Image: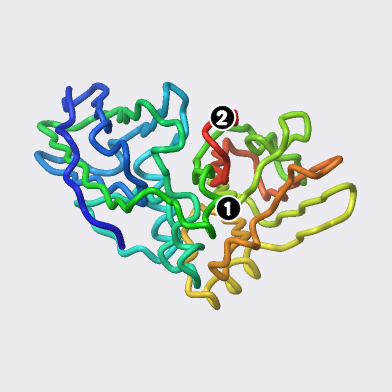
Amino acid sequence: MGLRLKCLPFNNVVANGVATLDLSSLLGTTIERITLQLGGTALTKAMLTSIQMKANGKIIYDTSGARRDTCMQYRGITANAGFLVLDFSEIRSKTELGQSLGSIDTTMGVTSLKMEIAIAGATAPTLQAWAEVDRPQVDVSQASTRPLIARVHSSNQTIGGSGQFSISVPHFAVSEGGSIYKRIAIFSANMTGLLIKKNGVVVEENIKSLNDYQQMEYKKVPQAGLYMMDFITDDNQTQALNTRDAQTMEILGTFSAGETIVIEVEVLEPLGAF
């Protein structure tokens, strides 16, 4: 756990609008986690309909309060109505390097860092952010991983009915250059199975019941309405799926009925990507 710093105040924290936060006070540090403290009248995580972080004007984190809370509860982070964690680290990784891998070393070319949170349906909300930070990642052991940021990107897709369908996972296509995937979270009420092919060869195949059961063996907490493809279930980041070296990549989901799904990926990428 890093040292805790209180961030600057949010601007424009209103019942319906976009609150903004200047995170420039954190420049010069490595940001491991940011915890949002929700307060005031009737502000819930579901009312945070969009959460974006931008480094040098580029989106590096794109989620919502409800989705991020679900993903963090899957990871075993204690649920609390008053707090929401945006985590760039892996606090339960088995090595110190693994714990810090993905944390934002702001000395690696970050000149501006901001957060934008869309609020909808509140009455008199309040927001405060707290950061867990460490020194820049200057150890020799961190040299190759220092530029990597644990980024979150999301997309929507409509599934036409029951059957097996190709899933449009952000940055999965070889034409997009691929990425290093820690987790692929698919928010779906009807998804029952998953198949992944790399270079035409099946590298992962599972069904929802098996997936949930084996994740519980590793002390994860499966969530309703979430099909989590967790490549680092054992908390070893070396198990992340690297699609950068692939000639072809394909991910197929099996569904019992049609619906609109949200796909949210956790990837390791430098600031210059995407």
Closer to us: 193 or 9: 9
Picture quarter with the N terminus: bottom left
Q: Position of residue 6 (x, y in %)?
A: 16, 45
Binning the other alpha carbons within 10 Å of mark 2 as few (below 14), some (14 to 19) or many (20 upward) gives few
Closer to us: 32 or 127: 32
Q: Secondary structure at mark 2?
A: loop
The mark that comes first in sequence, 2 or 1, is 1
Q: Residue at x 19, y 48 (%)?
A: 5
Q: Position of residue 98 (x, y in %)?
A: 51, 63
Q: Position of residue 61 (x, y in %)?
A: 44, 36
CB contact under 8 Å: marks 2 and 1: no
In 3D space, how far apart are the residues under numbered discs 2 and 1 (Cα atoms)?
21 Å
**Residue type, numbered disc 2:** Gly
Image quadrant where residue 45 sits: top left
Q: Residue at x 44, y 51 (%)?
A: 138
Point out which mark residue 43 bears.
none
Image quadrant where residue 67 sits: top left
Rendered image coloring scheme: rainbow
Picture quarter with the C terminus: top right
Closer to us: 25 or 227: 25
Q: Residue at x 53, y 75 (%)?
A: 218
Q: Residue at x 30, y 30 (%)?
A: 117
**Residue type, numbered disc 1:** Arg
The nearer-to-camera label among 2 and 1 is: 2
**Residue indicated by mark 2:** 272
**Residue indicated by mark 1:** 183
